[in-house]
Image: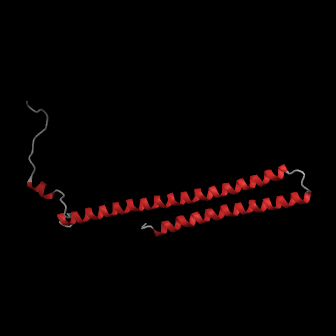
Amino acid sequence: MALSGNFQFRPPNNADVLNSERPSNEEVEYVDADSKKIALANADSIIFDSIASKKAVKDVFTQSSSFLDQSLRMVDKMQEAIDKKTNQIKANNCLTMEGLEKEMKELSEVHRNVKLLGALLMLIGENHSFRQLSQSKY
């Protein structure tokens, strides 16, 4: 099979090889086996630490979620007490105006206390979460 055209095979010239770009000794970094082992151990340590910190953060959020669920159940019980009191007031529609005002005042006070308790529980939950996060490694 003959080649046609102006194609000519030319072996590389020694001058071409010598003038080609090669990294200088400063650019080439030789890593011995011990350095590789140390680098891999450090990388493993970083990976395990990040996994542990992710688990710690997950645990904190799980605990906080559980705490907030308990708090919300308490608020629900208080809301049930408010509803029960409201139903008692409605059932006793023969109350005097003074008695009705007294019952409504007590009811509004309980309602206000429930709101304050809910806000307090939210703050406690957030504080608990931040405290747990600050105590974790990361």
Q: Quadrant of the C terminus?
A: bottom left
Q: Nearer the viewer, residue 20 or 116?
A: 116
Q: Quadrant of the N terminus?
A: top left
Residue drawn at (75%, 52%), measured in percent from left and top? Answer: 84
Q: Residue pushed farthest top?
A: 1
Residue 100 % position (x, y): 87, 57
Left or right of residue 103, residue 69 in this image: left
Instruction: Give the residue displayed 71% in from the left and 55% down from the top.
Output: 79
Q: Residue at position x 8%, y 55% from top?
A: 14
Q: In the displayed structure, does residue 28 sit left or right of residue 8?
A: right
* Residue 38 x/y as whole percent: 24, 66
Given residues 23 and 88, the one toward you in this image is 88
At horizontal 56% and vertical 60% (from top left) the residue drawn is: 67
- Residue 53 in the image: state x and y as whole percent: 41, 62
Relative to 11, is 118 on the left or the right?
Answer: right
The chosen color scheme is secondary structure
Name the spot of residue 104 as percent of width and height, x first: 83, 58
Q: How many numbered marks does the figure carry?
A: 0
Against 7, residue 17 (above or below) is below
